[in-house]
Image (spheres, rainbow, N blue to C red):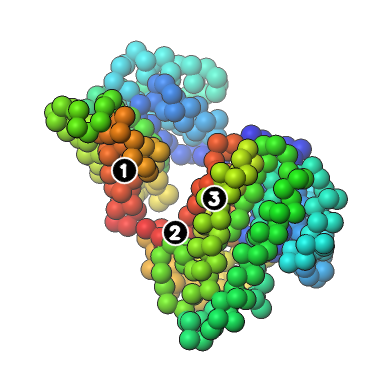
Amino acid sequence: MTLAGKTVVVVGGTSGVGLHIVLQAAAAGAKAVGLGRSPLRVAAAQEKARAAGVAAVFEQADGTDETSLRAALERHAPIAHVVASALDAEEHALGDFRKTGTAGLKRGMNKFWLSCTLIEQSDDLLEPDGSITLMSGSDERKAWPGVVAHAIVGGALNALVRTLAIELAPHRINVICPGPTVDSVNDAIERPQRVTGMQPWGERFPLKRVGDSSEVAHGALFLMTNGYVTGTILDIDGGASV
Amino acid sequence: MNPMFDMTGRVALVTGATRGIGRCIVEQYVQHGARVVVNSRKPADCEAVAEAVNRDAGRDAAWPCAFDFSDQAAIEDGADRAVAHWDRLDTLGGNAYVTALGTEGELDPAVFVDVLRINVVNNAILANRALPALRASGEGVVIFIGSASGLAPSPAVAAYGISKRALMHMMQNLAVE
């Protein structure tokens, strides 16, 4: 399956992994659309795409609000592929259970509800051979202390995908479990510091490093373009889960 | 092409490469810029596939290298020849396998042993032999072809499924090592 001429919509597509997916899909000939909540990030993403020499569209839309999301999706229908790659730092509950408490875990689960909303709102706008790609995380595949919110949302997303692969067919649905990543496009200045800061984390994995956001995006393109893959949990984690 | 799919400069060895999935792997690797060592048991088949691939690619992209994947000495010699031809190896595509129909209870133990030996142990022999070249590559990759029958019980091909499950576990061990 080629992406040429196909519409790809990425929720959380104005920064991080999502932006890489938009840029890689656009470079592959897709009509790529990145949605994000922050107007600043939308403008910055447009600038990045121009600098990269690819034609991609970035729009302000709130993936947590079904009306806002639905309006954006309808503007671009019919859609070949949707991706949920949104993660808001404020909702990102780090820490062990005694610190996050139930409230922290509930905030962490926002990513799960956002993914569900995207699936629900795009269902009738997806082409028959369309696909849905979600992002969970390697913290679900192998337990570590201090990331319980990541682990539970990852577990919920992984379970969701296996069940929905059966229920939503012929639409395909898959989930990527990324390990910790840094972003070489958006954080070109910040990146060396982040790599240094995160390197001890990466040392625990077989590949002895953290990933790059572009490497996770590469997996998303594979999941979109291989028409025989559904219900798959794709680990892109330097071997963290092995 | 997405630059992350670009295999220009890489050399791959693909076993069981003259038909089915193996042949598709060869063709797509070459389309993405790689050079490929084409292996199966039969020299004539390897030569025919390499010739067809080179003709389509319009370059020296495929080299036939027949060896018998059921024989340890042949595997080691074949791996050495594969590495020597272009003086490097970046990707090992372990695709060759044998299968046997029947439930575990019906199997001749000798057949069962052969399936496990060829599908699991011989892939280990091949990977170990190729390892120095893959390490020298700096971006070495080993890819084994597993099977859905290694994920859930498949009584019709019991020995095959068991061997593929073992192969998938071996892959994880190798990843950590």
Residue type indicated by callout 3: Thr
What separation in Å lies between label 3 and label 2 (alpha carbons)?
27 Å
Foreground: disc 3 or disc 2: 3
**Which label lies toward us, 2 or 1?**
1
**Rendering coords of residue B13 (x, y %):** 37, 33
What chain letter is assigned to the residue under label 1? B
Question: What quarter of the picture does the C terminus of chain A occupy?
Answer: bottom left
A200 or A227, which is in the foreground?
A: A227
Q: Is residue A177 left or right of residue B153?
A: right
Q: Which residue is drawn at the image coordinates 79% and 42% (left, top)?
A: A78
3 and 2 marks on the same chain: yes
Q: Residue at the spot x=53%, y=34% of the render?
A: B33
Q: Which residue position is annotated with label 3?
A: A163
Say whether mark 1 and mark 2 are on the same chain.
no
SS under mark 1: helix
| Chain letter of the residue carrying label 2 | A
Residue A222, disc: none
Q: Nearer the viewer, mark 3 or mark 1?
A: 3
Tell me the tag on residue B165.
1
Q: Is residue A240 above or below residue B127?
A: below
Q: Chain of mark 3?
A: A
Disc 2 target residue: A238
Tell me residue A19's x, y (percent): 69, 58
Q: Look at the image and tell me whether residue A216 can be seen.
A: no
Q: Amino acid at mark 2?
A: Gly
Left or right of A133, for residue A124:
right
Q: Quadrant of the N terminus of chain A?
A: top right
Marks 3 and 1, how far apart at CA: 23 Å
